[in-house]
Amino acid sequence: MSDTLLPPPPPRLRRPAIAALGVLALALGALQSVVEPALPLLQRELGLGPSEGALVANTLLVTGAVLTPVAGKLGDRYGGKRVLLRLMAVVAAGGLLAGLAPGLPLLLLGQVLQGAMVGVLPLSFILVRAHLPAGRTQAAIGVVVALFTGGGMVGMLGAGLIAEHLSWHWMFVLPTLVVVAATLFVARLMPSDAPVRRGERIDWPGVVLLSATLLAFMLGLVLLTGGGLPPLAAGALLVLVAVLATVWVRVERRAVSPMVDLRMLARPAMRQACLLTLLVTVTLGMVTLLLPQLLAVSGDGYGFDADTSEIGLYLLPGAVVGAMSDAVGGVASRRFGARVVVAAAALATAATMFALAAQHDSAWQLVLAKTLTAFAAGLATTALLAGTATAVDPGDTGIATSLLVVTRVIGVVVGAQIAGALLAAGTDARTDVPAEAAFTTGFAVTGVTAALGLLLVRATRASRSPQPAEPAPAPVKEGTRP
């Protein structure tokens, strides 16, 4: 009799549904990555400096940082598939707007809308956990991230060809059309997932306050590192972020169904995962900005005078191994523990960047550095993400992984803006070209940041994954919902 009270098992993912989700991830990765190799081209055509170029590269990530925790929470409440389809409508609108933009303002607005694609990752994790056995979840999460990263290969390789034979506008239009087609197939083939938090009210005050806090922080970061902001305005931004964060914490503590369960953030292992993810991705963001800029500098003295297509080819090996590391990051986390994986990645990144600071006069050195750092970053961040996704309660999968995805985004933005500020500080006013010493300093700072990650790993308590510190909840009766 008790068997009739148990809910039916969710439908398993079939190959056509997996293929549709994979094509969507590839298309989104391509749409996100076209800016990186084409950034020098966009700077020339739009008359932008290094700091403004970093703004173009990071606008998408700013929106992603704001929307991702909201998307994860809504996915827990309403179902991953339902929220994913709505986000894709926003992404498509942003891609088409960027493709039609006549100048910088509309291009930035299009990038803002495209930032909704970052929220697809936690929603995909919700779908994976809902439709796959527990033992396959970590590996499947690695595959999802790898497909997203793999799309970056297509974007990096195709951006230059499209920009040179058509125009830079088509770099955004073509991947967007694939996103629209893949979304239609996902809507048709992907089984719906039942909301885990059915019946819970959405903490809209918490949603608004968290979004405002992240937006103020990200925009403040961009303005501060861009230079030219008066000290009084900088202080006001810091105060605004602090006030918004304080009010958000107070609201969450009193909410019946909070946007983020602060007890989850209070767990030492969760804090450690966020800090480690932040340090790993700061180094990734610095590498992402520094290498294309150095490749594009005129070959007189220290640059390589590479055009957009050549930059894409130089960066392609890094994109390939990055996708491979994402695919195995979840497996590595299960086998060795996230802490060990992050330590190895931090050591490899620090050694690579110090070596690059000492010697960077050949293109193969930059290619090798990009390859090694991309592999290390993908392995570490995916290991942390997979460990977190399988450690929390099923009803918290979306919001918990969203927090780490947001941390990844913030880290990349921080790193890119720091690198852009270093290059701007070392730019010759007569030529508008950064001096070689600016790149050397950037590589050295990246190495120091990676070394700090290694020190943090050694300082934290050893654990295989960010397991909850609190005792497991008491068992519930059969046929009831926890």
Image (cartoon, rainbow, N blue to C red):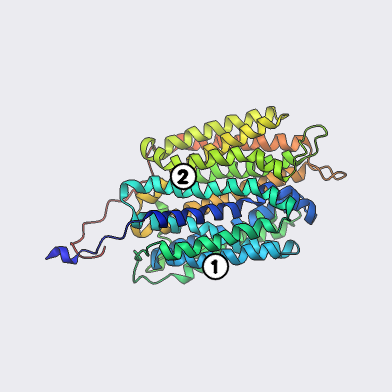
Q: Which mark is residue 71?
A: none
* Residue type at tag 1: Ala
| Picture quadrant where residue 351 is located | top right
Which kind of residue does numbered mark 2 sit on?
Thr
Earlier in the chain: of badge 2 and badge 1, it is: 1
Q: Residue at x 80, y 38 (%)?
A: 298
Circle 2 crowding by C-alpha within 10 Å: few under 14, some 14–19, many from 20: many
Measure how far apart labels 2 and 1 are at the Cα level. Answer: 27 Å
Occupied quadrant, residue 360: top right
**Residue at 69% over, 52% down:** 162
For the question of whether residue 250 can be seen, the reply is: no
- In this rendering, would 390 be left or right of 174? left
SS of the residue at dot 1?
A: helix
Of the 4 image quadrants, the one containing the C terminus is bottom left
Residue 176 screen position, x and y as percent: 60, 60
* Secondary-structure class at tag 2: helix
Residue 174 position within the rendered picture, expressed as x and y whole percent measured from the top left: 63, 58
Disc 1 crowd, CA 10 A, few/some/many (<14, 14-19, 20+): some
Residue 152 shows in this picture: yes
Looking at the image, which is closer to me, 457 or 166? 166
Q: Residue at x 70, y 65 (%)?
A: 100
Q: Residue furthest right?
A: 430
Image: 467 above or below 475: above
Please name whichever residue, 477 or 174, is drawn nearer the observer in this view of the structure. Answer: 174
Which label sits on residue 382?
A: 2
Mark 1 lies on residue: 89
Q: Quadrant of residue 430?
A: top right
Where residue 144 appears, as percent x and y from the top left, is 46, 50
Q: Nearer the viewer, residue 475 or 264?
A: 475
Q: Please provide percent x and percent y for residue 201.
A: 39, 72
